[in-house]
């Protein structure tokens, strides 16, 4: 199948009934009892494998091939069920055998497209098996086999064992393959009491994912294949930012803003009684508080002329120059000098090693 996203809904699209290659599973579960004479023995506590099984009853003598499917095998101990019999001569235990046979065919999948990522949306139970496909097993006379490739891939991925080597006080559990390690349920228990979870759901999901990916890749590599391009109904969604006004917060913010304006206005109430035009200019406010840098101007200079006079002043940062009077007391008393911003000429460059304070 070829999957193309609609650019109008590029964030997330859900499509139903995308048809592709897949499998229909038929599974069965049974219990197996094992027993060994008391003493040294080895018993398989976990075993997974992937085989081919014959579907049709045709004569295979001439071609050495047959219509085949995949068989998943999982045998495992799912509980600490080993025990010694009443006469103390042998040890017995129970294993669970889970076998699934897979028939190849056309399967309808539900998929989701999120940008450039395509993934299966539903679980296996929601897949719809539409039509079986006849796939031949590998031939002893050469040629290729599609089902044989899936079987080989599955066997490489899933083959795993766990063997209990019982020797009384000296016993061990040997794990081989990823599934045995992944599904070991109680690694802290003694060797003959260790158990495993059922690996079959993982095996079925993995083969389902491989089959779906193979369908997408085959259609991409060969667009002339039947049903490589499909038109299916879909549901598309996109994410857009929507702003909603909370009237309670809006009213609260408006009240706070109005109270702030009223509080500031109260400090300016009666400005008309000053007898002259005034402003809220920072320079005029500084002049009103007799800022030293502005003390050379008239006390009643208009606010709009203050910037012009300030622009003519040259300001420097340095040590205040002592010119007698009140300011001279710093040096006369041996106090530290003062670093300030002042008119050029009223300060000098600080000296290295000089002492300066407030």
Image (tube, helix red, strand yellow):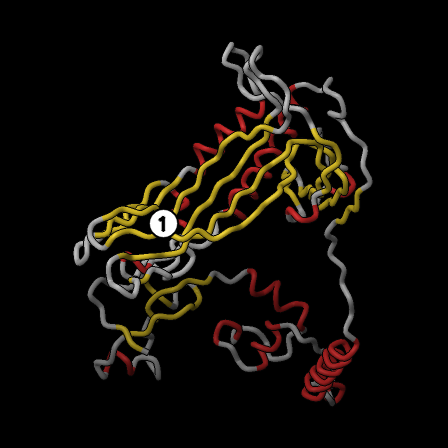
Q: Residue at x 46, y 44 (%)?
A: 74
Residue at point 75%, 36% (across, down): 130
Q: Residue at x 31, y 47 (%)?
A: 43
Give the vertical position of 176 relative to 309 (above or below).
above
Picture coordinates of residue 107, whole percent (x, y) = 71, 36
Residue 61 at x, y percent in the picture: 56, 13
Does 283 sit left or right of 88 as displayed? right
- Secondary structure state at the residue bearing disc 1: strand
Q: Position of residue 271 (x, y in %)?
A: 73, 86
Where residue 318 appears, as percent x and y from the top left, is 35, 65
> Label 1: how many residues lie within 10 Å, few (<14), some (14-19) or many (20+)?
many
Q: In the figure, residue 206 lies in which quadrant?
A: top right
Image-quadrant location for residue 310:
bottom right
Number of residue marks? 1
Report which quarter residue 273 is drawn in: bottom right
* Tag 1 residue: 45
Q: Pick whichever, 209 or 125, lies toward us.
A: 125
């Amino acid at each position: 199948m070829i999957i193309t996203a609609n650019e109008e809904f590029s964030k997330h699209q859900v499509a139903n009934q995308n048809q592709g290659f897949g499998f229909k599973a038929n599974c069965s579960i049974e219990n197996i009892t094992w027993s060994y004479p008391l003493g040294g023995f080895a018993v398989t506590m976990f075993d997974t494998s992937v085989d081919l099984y014959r579907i049709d009853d045709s004569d295979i003598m001439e071609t050495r091939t047959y219509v085949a499917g995949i068989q998943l095998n999982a045998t495992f101990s799912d509980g600490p069920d080993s025990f010694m019999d009443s006469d103390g001569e042998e040890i017995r235990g129970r294993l669970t055998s889970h076998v699934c046979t897979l028939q190849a065919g056309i399967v309808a999948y539900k998929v989701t497209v999120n940008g450039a990522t395509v993934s299966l949306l539903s679980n296996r139970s929601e897949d719809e098996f539409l039509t079986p496909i006849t796939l031949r097993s590998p031939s002893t006379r050469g040629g290729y086999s599609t089902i044989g490739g899936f079987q080989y891939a599955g066997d490489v991925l899933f083959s795993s064992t766990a063997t209990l080597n019982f020797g009384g006080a000296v016993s061990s559990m040997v794990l081989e393959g990823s599934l045995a390690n992944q599904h070991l349920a109680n690694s802290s228990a003694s060797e003959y009491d260790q158990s495993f979870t059922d690996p079959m759901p993982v095996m079925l999901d993995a083969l389902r994912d491989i089959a779906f990916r193979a369908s997408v890749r085959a259609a991409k590599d060969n667009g002339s294949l039947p049903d490589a391009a499909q038109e299916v109904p879909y549901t598309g969604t996109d994410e857009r930012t929507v702003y909603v006004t909370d009237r309670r917060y809006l009213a609260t913010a408006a009240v706070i803003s109005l109270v702030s304006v009223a509080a500031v206005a109260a400090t300016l109430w009666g400005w008309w009684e000053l007898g002259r035009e005034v402003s809220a200019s920072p320079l005029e406010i500084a002049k009103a508080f007799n800022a030293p840098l502005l003390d050379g101007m008239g006390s009643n200079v208009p606010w709009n002329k203050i910037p012009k006079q300030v622009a003519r002043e040259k300001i420097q940062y340095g040590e205040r120059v002592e010119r007698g009077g009140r300011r001279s007391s710093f040096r006369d008393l041996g106090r530290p000098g003062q670093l300030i911003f002042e008119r050029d000429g009223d300060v000098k460059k600080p000296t290295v090693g000089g002492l300066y304070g407030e």
